[in-house]
Image: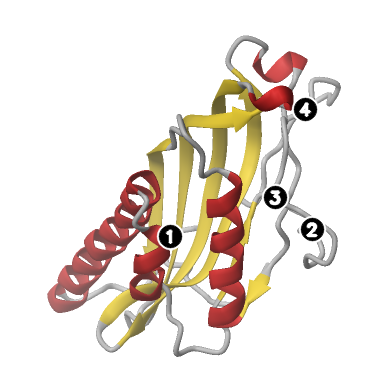
C-alpha cells in the first residue's frame, strides 16, 4: 500500500467523518419524517449515475427515480403508530486516494411497524446492511449509489426463523430485483449476506 502524506491522512479522516455524518443524517431524517424534504441534500442529484435500491425495490436511476422510490417507501410505512428506528452498526468506510469517491458499509438493526390484515398494527424487528458509494458534489459528500439489503423483517413475536420476511417494496413495473436480495432463510445450510465490505484503499463507483 502506498504511504500517504500527513495531509492525505488528515483528508481521509475528515472524509470518513463527513461520510458517517451523512449516513447518520439519512437515518435521523428517516425516523423524524424529514427524508422527503431532505433527500435532495443527501444525494448527488447533479450526477446522471446517481441511483438507489431498497430491499427488493430494484435499482432506481436518476434523481426522479430516487424520489419515486423514497416516496413509495414513505407512503407504505406512513401510518398512525409507525415506528422506524434503525441503528447504524459495524461501520467500514474506505476513501480512494484522491478523495473523490468512497465506499461505506453498515449493518442496520431496528424496528418497524407493519400494517397487517384487518388494519392491525404489528411490531417488527428488522436487520439489513447498507452498501453505499459516495462522491463529492460542490465540496460536500453525497450518496452516489445507495443500497440497503434486507436480512430479515419479522414480527417480534414470531422471529426470523419462523417468518423471516413479512413483506417487501417490489411492485409490478418496478426495476429488476438485485441478485444481492437474499434474505435469511431457515432452510439454508449457510446464510451469506453479500456484498462484502470494502477492503483497505478500495473505493470505486459502479454497480456490483
Residue 13 vs 79, above or below: the answer is below
Disc 4 and disc 2: Cα gap in Å?
Answer: 22 Å
Read off the residue under disc 1.
Answer: 200
Tag shown at residue 169? 3
Q: Describe the element under mark 3 as helix, strand or loop.
A: loop
Q: Describe the element under mark 1 as helix, strand or loop.
A: loop
Q: Quadrant of the C terminus?
A: bottom right
Q: Sequence order check: which comes first, mark 1 or mark 3?
A: 3
Q: Which residue is nearer to you in this view: 120 or 182?
A: 120
Side of 94 where 18 appears, left or right: left
Disc 2 and disc 1: Cα gap in Å?
Answer: 29 Å
Side of 127 where 17 appears, left or right: left
Q: Quadrant of the N terminus?
A: bottom left
Q: Describe the element under mark 4 as helix, strand or loop.
A: loop
Q: Sequence order check: which comes first, mark 2 or mark 1?
A: 2
Disc 1 and disc 3: Cα gap in Å?
Answer: 33 Å
Its colouring scheme is secondary structure
Tag shown at residue 190? 4
Q: Sequence order check: which comes first, mark 3 or mark 4?
A: 3
Amino acid at each position: 500500500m502506498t504511504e500517504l502524506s500527513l495531509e492525505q491522512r488528515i483528508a481521509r479522516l475528515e472524509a470518513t467523518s463527513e461520510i458517517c455524518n451523512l449516513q447518520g443524517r439519512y437515518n435521523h431524517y428517516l425516523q423524524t419524517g424529514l427524508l422527503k424534504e431532505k433527500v435532495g441534500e443527501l444525494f448527488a442529484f447533479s450526477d446522471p449515475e446517481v441511483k438507489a435500491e431498497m430491499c427488493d425495490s430494484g435499482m432506481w436511476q436518476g434523481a426522479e427515480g430516487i424520489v419515486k422510490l423514497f416516496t413509495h417507501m414513505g407512503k407504505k410505512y406512513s401510518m398512525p403508530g409507525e415506528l422506524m428506528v434503525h441503528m447504524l452498526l459495524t461501520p467500514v468506510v474506505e476513501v480512494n486516494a484522491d478523495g473523490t469517491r468512497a465506499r461505506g458499509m453498515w449493518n442496520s438493526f431496528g424496528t418497524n411497524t407493519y400494517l397487517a390484515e384487518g388494519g392491525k398494527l404489528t411490531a417488527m424487528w428488522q436487520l439489513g446492511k447498507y452498501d453505499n458509494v459516495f462522491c463529492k458534489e460542490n465540496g460536500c459528500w453525497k450518496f452516489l449509489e445507495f443500497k440497503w439489503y434486507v436480512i430479515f423483517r419479522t414480527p417480534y413475536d414470531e422471529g426470523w426463523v419462523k417468518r423471516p420476511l413479512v413483506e417487501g417494496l417490489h411492485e409490478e413495473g418496478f426495476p429488476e430485483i438485485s441478485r444481492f436480495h437474499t434474505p435469511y432463510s431457515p432452510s439454508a445450510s449457510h446464510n451469506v449476506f453479500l456484498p462484502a465490505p470494502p477492503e483497505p484503499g478500495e473505493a470505486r463507483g459502479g454497480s456490483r
